[in-house]
Image: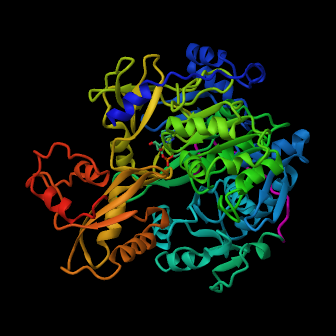
Amino acid sequence: MSETLSNLLHEERRFAPPEAFAAAANVTATAYQEAAADRLAFWATQARRLTWATPWSEVLDWSAAPVARWFVGGRLNVAYNCVDRHVEDGHGDQVAFRWEGEPGDTRTITYAELKDMVCRAANGLAELGVRAGDRVAIYLPMIPETVVAMLACARLGAPHTVVFGGFSATALSDRILDCDARVVITADGGYRRGAVSALKPAVDEALQRCPDVRSVLVVRRGGNEVGWTEGRDVWWHELVDRQSAEHTAEPFDAEHPLFVMYTSGTTGKPKGILHTSGGYLTQVAYTHHAVFDVKPDEDLYWCGADIGWITGHSYIVYGPLANRTTSFLYEGTPNTPSEHRWWEMIERYRMTILYTAPTTIRTFMKWGPEIPAAHDLSSLRLLGSVGEPINPEAWMWYRSVIGGDRCPVVDTWWQTETGAIMISPLPGVTATKPGSAMTALPGVGADVVDQDGVPVPNGGGGMLVLTEPWPAMTRGIWGDPERFQETYWARFAAQGFYFAGDGAKKDEDGDLWLLGRVDDVMNVSGHRISTTEVESALVSHPTVAEAAVVGATDPTTGQAIVAFVILRTTEPADNLAGTLRDHVAKEIGAIAKPRQILVVPELPKTRSGKIMRRLLRDVAENRKLGDVTTLTDSTVMDLIRDKLPSAP
Ligand code: PRX
């Protein structure tokens, strides 16, 4: 890491916003001054972007810290704010989504149409008995119904939990059980890599473990054959299409739960991150307006994330819709039918703003600059990055090859827990540095501290903390307040700082450089996966006695999963690695498949029995071993090395 650091800190390139961009930008430097003068007044101003049925009486109640209450006493309906009010304001004909399926089929949905769809779905869910407070699980491909399903839940005050379609049946059932969802919304299947990928069978399998689920609402998308449980399963088109398009949106308390999004922590069990209504919507709307500079009447905005992750929730659904954005939505993979797909669509639709992850950018770099160069990308005016540290090479490539050296690049740091972007340049204000997320946004407090919680001076490195409560902050881990306190707040309790779990550096100007996780969480293609989660999946296979998993640096995916396993048998079976990789995919999902599985005779452990992943990471990255003195038996590492293929 120290080598990366010194490279990063020699970065001297600066890219000031183009003059015309700065002159027309939604947000100027005064936002920093306003927020610094009175942070709560600043957030109250932002909350007025929304339409409230009842005004709040207090901006922030922090008396029950670390569980915040923002906009106390205020009432609003999130779906009304995302849809109805725009129609009432005369924008019903404006397009909310231009959608394209992977096979090339298209749909255009105006705000008026979206309103009808959401009302019908809300009436349909109500017919299934869904009431305010009930949890609804959503397991869908990237189709407009996914947005509609989320908004219908929000409209009813029923918190949704969207499970990424790439997760396995086991992962799905864990999530359904943890938040006790009684209704599941899914599809027969969706298109991926040129074929229908079935979803319903995973739901059927998951529900064998979830006896309390009474209804499964199934969207027809793939047209594939599906199993059917009479009395439980119901087609979306049969239930929803016959409903009335009238539905009165009831206002809910600002702190009413909006959704639970599961994410990996340092233990095997995913955490249900809870977000509520008023503060969350305020900050996603503000940051979407400020960071992406969206002009509702002009832009066509595309966030290439999956709706099943927090980025999709905040910057495909809630932020953009609250701001009356016209968005593009795409179902499939970037190389179907060819590696030209993304750029061909950006050219054809004349998209103006693109938000994606470094791993995607690096994949396109690998495919070659001639692919985007074959398309007219001159409509683009702003580029965003999220999910993992972006290396300066990828940043520069994004800026020049995709952005034609004309588009500001905003590297946005945030997390499932923060709900909204926290650290990012403002595109009309900040002179950016390739690879730096720059500074905290107006109204946000961030710093880098040492082990004792003392802020490091400029030029120093340490751990990233958030120093002030923020409106979109999680209100806790579903059903586990102790774990919430322990994970994020215990470490710097004396200072009252939120511990993000990321390492960071402040450069000589005080700008922030994010360096990746400091805990046992891996970041693979921008997806958070815990080492223990993969280890538990591996040891649940009958041939594995013990497993240790590390994230090793990977040129495309950021990190890749490397697993070290001790077997119960002496002779490894044929294709053991393949079997174990498939087993992990079945237990968690394909995203958690190890890149490499190495059979070893022992694992390096400290005297207290803790696996020293640091040493295994050295092996996986083919580096000289670090300090081995705390190992019970330092010869273990020689044994491991001996077993390895020449270059890991
Ligand atoms: O390590 C940081 C990394 O992703 C983690 C959060 O993951 P998740 O909750 O899945 O949310 C991802 C999308 C917001 C962080 O703790 N991360 C996210 N964005 C960046 C980043 N690391 C560096 N730079 C970023 N821009």
Give above or below for 483 relative to 49: below
Q: Is residue 217 magenta?
A: no
Depth check: 62 or 103 in front? 103
Q: Which colour assignment does the render follow?
A: rainbow
Q: Can residue 284 be seen from the camera position used here?
A: no
Q: Can residue 446 be seen from the camera position used here?
A: yes
Where does the image place residue 283, in percent across and percent down from the top left?
62, 35
Depth check: 94 or 56 in front? 94
Start-end of magenta stretch: 242-259
* Residue at 83 percent of width and 60 percent of height: 107
* Residue at 72 percent of width and 31 percent of height: 293
Depth check: 538 or 470 in front? 538
Where does the image place residue 103, in percent across and percent down from the top left?
76, 68
Q: Quadrant of residue 323?
A: top right
Give above or below for 229 relative to 62: below
Q: Give the number of marks.
A: 0
Q: Quadrant of residue 34?
A: top right
Where does the image place residue 461, in percent across and percent down from the top left?
35, 27
Q: Is residue 512 left or right of residue 348?
A: left
Q: Quadrant of residue 386?
A: top right
Q: Quadrant of the C terminus?
A: bottom left
Q: Is residue 103 left or right of residue 134?
A: right
Main SS of the magenta segment?
loop
Give above or below for 202 relative to 344: below
Q: Quadrant of the N terminus?
A: top left
Q: Is residue 257 magenta?
A: yes
* Residue at 80 percent of width and 39 percent of height: 379
